[in-house]
Image (cartoon, helix red, strand yellow):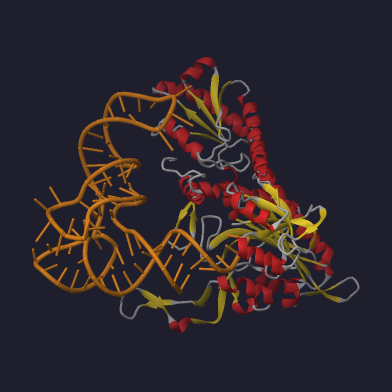
Amino acid sequence: MAKNFSTREDNYSQWYNDLVIKADLAEYSAVRGCMVIKPYGFAIWEKMQSVLDGMFKATGHSNAYFPLFIPKSFFSREASHVEGFAKECAVVTHYRLKNSPDGKGIVVDEDARLEEEYIVRPTSETIIWDTYRNWIQSYRDLPILVNQWANVVRWEMRTRLFLRTTEFLWQEGHTAHATREEAIAETEQMLGIYADFAQNWMAMPVLQGVKSPNERFAGAEETYCIEALMQDGKALQAGTSHFLGQNFAKAFDVKFLNRENKLDYVWASSWGVSTRLMGALVMTHSDDHGLVLPPKLAPIQVVIVPIYKKEEELQSINAVVLPMKQALEKEGVRVKYDDRDTFTPGFKFAEHEFRGVPLRLAIGPRDLQNGTIEVARRDTLEKETYQMTDIGIKVRHLLESIQSNLFNKALTFRDDNTRYANSWDEFVKLLDEKGGFICAHWDGTAETEQKIKDETKATIRVIPLDQKPEPGKCIYSGAPSTARVVFARAY
RNA sequence: CGGGGUAUAGCGAAGCCCGGUUAUCGCGCCUGCUUUGGGAGCAGGAGAUCGCUGGUUCGAAUCCAGCUACCCCGACCA
């Protein structure tokens, strides 16, 4: 499997593509820019979904579902929203096909043109706020805390598996509140949930903060984000949470009577993470031997490989493994017993390694004799032979150890690749030679940010929430600045 | 949309310049035997309208024209 597999050093983006395809996460489809997420890849996404969904429910949110199609007119209601998405919308114009007059194939029936064209949702704020108008009359109807799991379409010019596909899967939360403070609190709470998920489940350290006006969501007053650093030194936005102010309430005329019996517009938030997280997961931990998965999200946490020559040997191995597997499963460990007789042990080792299974247990005649089992961990590639007794406890400890090791490794990497620049020359040099996060002073203007982007391709990834006040001068304009922001080249 | 490239078996390639029987190789796939503690070996076998359409020719994967699709680089982006 890992034969003819690129290394990170050699060609990072080739390495990423090879990995996604050869680890069986996804493949290209017949549709340009759209991928097929394969069962193994989808199992990871399902795990992410179920954990996040639990977190949303635990904070009082409910799931609902809104239409895939959005009337074109809805989009023009909120000016900056249209501007942000107009260039990447797929549009439905007809609702019928007919046999081609020349008898060859099938054509669009021009008589079946839609009165009003539909946009395939690139995001659902407009249809949802049009709906909320009917749901909200009084402060007693608030807050509305709704999430939907859905697919969206954004017609990107260039696509990459998981990181940027024309159609992708995500969740989008849309909440409505009686006060500004409450909406902001919701926005920040969800950012916290994303950070928690990224760090404690994906083992991926993230910076939390807000976007500069240039990078803000179309229609938001403030965009919060979690930002991660990939192994090639490029930043990846892993999740966003928007404080929408009253922009959509005003655009869709959503008002409520407050406690003082006065009409007011509703305050809003929206927040989302997508299948892009899969790309983030791959690029955070994987190595030149293939995928590396944090145990908490791995579809298979432990694989057991029997080693035998004769059928009788397999029988005696089964007698030990099957009860052990059951015991592990009882403790909540996801175990696969790979007893396929059509592949050699060596092949299975390589395959599970490539697919990122955190722990591999191998057991053969020698182990049976000695009461031992060979344990190999994917993150360090270390192999060790343990006594069979109490293997359940050891496995659980090892899984925990792998989970925290992956996080610590990624954190060390990020720390090693976070640097300070105090002059323009230094900034450009660091960017070109090292990449990574660069903390620097910025004068706070969109013009300066744009110029920096034009000249270096670096953008302000995040203005950290825990930003420390520090007087300084903007690296580009020299104008005074009160604190550093984080720059990087990004996906 | 601009610039560059590619299209031959499930995948990756050779053949094309210089037209000539049955289109070649590796991986993968199928069958059998031997194997099995890091990607097994041997033997046999299946699998291709050479991207599409038309032209030149006795004869086209190969030459010519048109079309289509995909990839890479740039402008847009979670």
The answer to whether residue A55 shows anywhere in this view is no
Q: Where, by quadrant of the figure, is residue A125 drawn? A: bottom right
Up/down of A132 relative to A437, above or below:
below
Quadrant for the C terminus of chain A, please. Answer: bottom right
The residue at the point 56 percent across, 47 percent down is A282
Q: Quadrant of residue A99?
A: bottom left
Q: Position of residue A453 (x, y in %)?
A: 63, 63
> Is residue A162 rendered to the left or right of residue A55?
left
A301 left or right of A481? left
Residue at the (65%, 27%) spot, across then down: A393
State the count of labels: 0
Residue B20 place in picture, x, y as percent:
13, 56
Name which residue lies at 50% across and 15% down: A369
Q: Nearer the viewer, residue A10 or A104?
A: A10
Q: Position of residue A374 (x, y in %)?
A: 53, 24
- Classify A337 as above or below A264: above
Q: Residue furthest top?
A: A369
Q: Looking at the image, which residue sits at the far right?
A: A260
- x, y percentage for residue A66? 63, 67
Residue at the image position 68 percent from the left and 52 percent from the top: A438
Give the camera-side residue of A286 and A275: A286
Q: Give the quadrant of the N terminus of chain A.
A: top left
Frontmost residue, A233 versus A121: A233
Seen in the picture, residue A355 relative to A113 is either above or below; the reply is above
